[in-house]
Image (cartoon, helix red, strand yellow):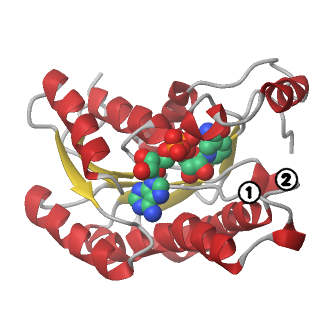
Amino acid sequence: MNRFENQIAIVTGAGRGIGEAIAKSLAEGGAKIACVSRSEANSAKVADAINAVHPGAAKPYAVDVADKKAVEAAAAKIFADFGKVDILVNNAGITRDGLAMRMSEEDWDAVLDTNLKGAFNFIQAVMRPMIKQRSGRIVNIASVAGLMGNAGQANYAASKAGLIGLTKTLARELAGRGITVNAVAPGFIKTDMTDVLNENIKSAVVGQIPLGRFGEPGDIAAAVAYLASADASYITGQTLTVDGGMVMA
Ligand code: NAI
């Protein structure tokens, strides 16, 4: 199925976990992928894995999304390498958990700078060319924590709620230019990020999930691919929860 034929996608945080699954799924649909990750080794590993199946389809870019100048330089390189960008998936994200009472300024800033400012940095870097070409798909990876809050994650929940507000605002600003902007809010997905939770927390979480299990990175990748595809051309400003039924609006 080549629903992304001739399309260029940037996926941030593509070095592992959900971002890796998104990059591979868009490549499977025929897109060429700019694999962005903080770590050179991880972005190269995922780009190599994609190229092994779809020769020449992926290129790695090592960049810290929180660094505006570095993002501008990476975006310039991506435009030089691929000529255009059709899809931007802002997936890079970190956690620095702790109760608000004891949260350091550094932990607050690191999470907001990566999860929220990082997404805005990439959006600004691709926005003008997308407006010129009068088409584009932007998908931001939020979290159920941004919808329902989560004790111990003041910084993370604020960053993800901010990402949802950013999504709605840009959806309104860019709709007239043929660009859709949506968010996906994953629940608990099996990745390195959730692997660090202890078994007691994991089983307490599973108890709150109607479908009774953690999700897989592929569950999020499928939702992103849908929102990035022509099938979703009449959907913008939405947050799609992919969480086994944890949050029901
Ligand atoms: P992960 O920790 O396995 O992977 C995150 C990726 O982002 C890594 O490749 C890392 O290098 C990259 N990254 C982190 N900071 C970066 C920066 N400053 N610049 C560039 N790249 C950076 O995480 P996972 O689980 O795959 O999460 C992906 C996204 O999904 C994140 O935004 C996360 O908040 C979100 N999410 C994950 C959930 C889960 O249960 N795993 C639940 C809800 C949301």
Q: Position of residue 242 (x, y in %)?
A: 68, 35
Mark 2, residue position = 150
Which residue corresponds to the image point at 29% horizontal and 26% vertical from the top-left?
Answer: 28
Which mark is first along the chain, 2 or 1? Answer: 1
Identity of the residue furthest to the top in this view: 212
Q: Amino acid at mark 1?
A: Asp
User: Alpha-carbon distance for marks 1 and 2?
Assistant: 10 Å
In this view, 230 is above or below 29: below
| Quarter-of-image position of residue 96 | bottom right
Asked if marks 1 and 2 touch (Cβ < 8 Å), the reply is no
- Numbered disc 2: secondary structure: loop
In front: 10, or 67?
67
Give the numbered dot on residue 97: 1
In this view, 11 is above or below 58: below
Taking the image as drawn, is residue 72 in sight?
A: yes
User: Which class describes the residues within 10 Å of circle 2: few (<14), some (14-19), or many (20+)?
Assistant: some
Q: Please state if 4 lies on the left or on the right of 97 as rendered.
A: left
Q: Position of residue 99 (x, y in %)?
A: 86, 62
In this view, 6 is above or below 183: above
Q: Amino acid at mark 2?
A: Asn
Which residue corresponds to the image point at 66% horizontal and 36% vertical from the top-left?
Answer: 196
Q: Position of residue 188 (x, y in %)?
A: 71, 34
Q: Please state if 47 lies on the left or on the right of 130 as rendered.
A: left
Which residue corresponds to the image point at 30% horizontal and 29% vertical from the top-left?
Answer: 29
| Quarter-of-image position of residue 61 | bottom left
User: Which class describes the residues within 10 Å of circle 1: few (<14), some (14-19), or many (20+)?
Assistant: some
Taking the image as drawn, is residue 235 in sight?
A: no
Q: Please state if 80 lies on the left or on the right of 180 as rendered.
A: left
